[in-house]
Image (cartoon, rainbow, N blue to C red):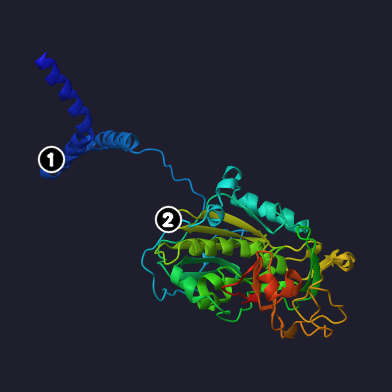
């Protein structure tokens, strides 16, 4: 029995070491050839090499497993030919400071529901090609998409290109056609704190910014309100409220976005929805040392210069925030030429007179004042708001209340807010703690 055991181990070792024995045989044949000069010694080199190679292939197959990492990157700023992007303009800046670790778990259930936003849609994740097809479908139909608010969720974040980006750093890229491409940042709580207050810079013209930005009317089916104002915004890929002054360092952090692409139908949709996911994470985790990897990829159809939408991927380092949001760059009732940015036709004009609450991001002439939302030209009441450039400024003791129950002193589109006294607003709303390019505390 003992001898049989020895023989068994002998053959196991022989099989395992056979490729190495073949290599040793090749070595001995070469030595003999060099010693004697007889080419006959080289005859055995080829078969031994093949046998040895076969053995090592078997080794590789035995010890390597299936690759479980099948993540699909979302760096798809252009689908027409090549998906590669050239870093034409890159800006990288570390945060001033990263606060020491604090609480990293959401502090209230309302915020927690919004932070873990990907769970509800993870079962129907669209591929990058499907996303472009859907964006083409929605924009061609002049649609606000499945939510009615110019966005939809698409499962968990699919990030790429973050290996060399440290906490507090960011970069903005152009694609191979010179259009705004992928924007990436590893955001910190200190950047969020530093960005509080007024706007940290002046929006830059993105590549192919249209030569004409007409005033139009968009009636939103979600809110039954009508927006009157400029069609296009210089839309941040990574927002002022998250990155502060760093968000103004490159034109490639901006795209030509419709007003509804920027803030949706109710001021909390479109790109604003994605931004608020990150903001709510910081609010739920004050002074945390956690970071947020934030990536925005504009999505273009072929050689068009205006994106059909954007893919925003957001993931916190503690994984409590992990979602992908697709933003739709369209306007209900308005057909757009995405190659030039020129509006082709509009059906909104036929219904704007029926809208109960007309609004304006600029002073509008010949508009009668409403009871709670007087026109920017109204003078009948001392409580009427006034205008200062693009801003509508509330009278003393008056405020603009948003749908999210926050009130402001100045806004760019008063029709999307309720204009009431501050005393009345205090009974159901709270003062906004921070402003953005559309509203100021």
The first of marks 1 and 2 along the sequence is 1
Q: How busy is the neighbourhood of tag 1: few (under 14 within 10 Å), some, or many (20 plus)?
A: some
- Closer to the observer: label 1 or label 2? 2
Q: Quadrant of the C terminus?
A: bottom right
Residue 436 falls in image quadrant: bottom right
Q: Secondary structure at mark 2?
A: loop
Q: How many marks?
A: 2
Q: Write down the residue under mark 1.
A: 32
Q: Residue at x 71, y 65 (%)?
A: 260
Q: Is residue 241 left or right of residue 68?
A: right
Label 2 near label 1: C-beta < 8 Å?
no
Examine the rendered structure and indicate whether residue 300 appears above or below residue 425. above
Q: Can residue 336 be seen?
A: yes
Task: Estimate the x, y position of residue 101 in percent, counting from the top left.
Answer: 37, 64
Q: Can residue 304 be seen?
A: no
Q: Secondary structure at mark 1?
A: helix
Q: CA distance from mark 1 to mark 2?
A: 63 Å
Residue 266 falls in image quadrant: bottom right
Task: Estimate the x, y position of residue 388 in percent, counting from the top left.
Answer: 71, 86
Q: Write down the residue under mark 2.
A: 318
Task: Estimate the x, y position of residue 134 in percent, counting from the top left.
Answer: 69, 52
Q: Residue at x 74, y 76 (%)?
A: 361
Q: Nearer the viewer, residue 51 or 338?
A: 338
Q: Residue at x 57, y 64 (%)?
A: 275
Examine the rendered structure and indicate whether residue 49 appears above or below residue 91. above
Q: Nearer the viewer, residue 307 or 287?
A: 287
């Amino acid at each position: 029995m003992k001898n049989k055991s020895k023989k068994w181990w002998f053959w196991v070792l022989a099989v395992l070491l056979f490729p190495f024995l073949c290599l040793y045989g090749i070595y001995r044949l070469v030595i003999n050839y060099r010693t004697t000069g007889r080419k006959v010694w080289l005859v055995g080199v080829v078969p031994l090499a093949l046998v040895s190679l076969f053995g090592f292939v078997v080794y590789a197959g035995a010890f390597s497993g299936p690759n479980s990492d099948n993540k699909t990157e979302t760096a798809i700023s252009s689908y027409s030919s090549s998906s590669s992007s050239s870093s034409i303009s890159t800006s990288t800046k570390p945060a001033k400071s990263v606060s020491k670790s604090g609480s990293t778990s959401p502090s209230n259930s309302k915020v927690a529901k919004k932070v873990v936003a990907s769970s509800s849609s993870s079962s129907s994740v669209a591929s990058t090609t499907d996303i472009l097809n859907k964006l083409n479908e929605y924009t061609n139909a002049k649609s606000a998409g499945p939510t009615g608010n110019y966005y939809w969720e698409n499962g968990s974040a699919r990030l790429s290109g973050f290996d060399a980006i440290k906490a507090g750093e960011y970069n903005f890229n152009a694609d191979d056609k010179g259009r705004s491409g992928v924007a990436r940042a590893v955001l910190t709580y200190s950047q969020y704190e530093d960005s509080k207050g007024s706007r940290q810079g002046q929006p830059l013209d993105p590549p192919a910014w249209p030569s004409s930005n007409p005033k139009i009317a968009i009636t939103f089916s979600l809110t039954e309100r009508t927006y009157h104002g400029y069609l296009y915004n210089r839309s941040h890929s990574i927002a002022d409220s998250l990155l502060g002054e760093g968000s103004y360092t490159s034109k490639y952090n901006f795209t030509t976005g419709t007003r509804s692409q920027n803030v949706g139908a109710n001021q909390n949709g479109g790109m604003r929805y994605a931004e608020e996911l990150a903001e709510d994470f910081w609010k739920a985790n004050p002074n945390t040392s956690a970071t947020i990897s934030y990536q925005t990829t504009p999505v273009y159809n072929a050689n068009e210069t205006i994106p059909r939408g954007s893919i925003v991927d957001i993931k916190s380092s503690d994984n409590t925030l992990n979602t992908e949001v697709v933003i739709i760059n369209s306007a209900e009732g308005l057909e757009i030429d995405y190659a030039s940015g020129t509006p082709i036709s509009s059906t909104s004009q036929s219904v704007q007179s029926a809208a109960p609450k007309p609004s304006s991001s600029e002073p509008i002439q010949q508009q009668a004042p409403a009871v709670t939302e007087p026109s920017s030209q109204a003078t009948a009441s001392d409580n009427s708001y006034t205008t200062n450039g693009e801003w509508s400024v509330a009278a003393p003791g008056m405020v603009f209340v948003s749908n999210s129950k926050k009130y402001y002193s100045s806004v760019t589109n008063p029709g999307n807010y309720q204009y009431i006294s501050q005393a009345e607003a205090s009974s159901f709303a709270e003062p906004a703690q921070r402003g953005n390019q559309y509203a100021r505390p």
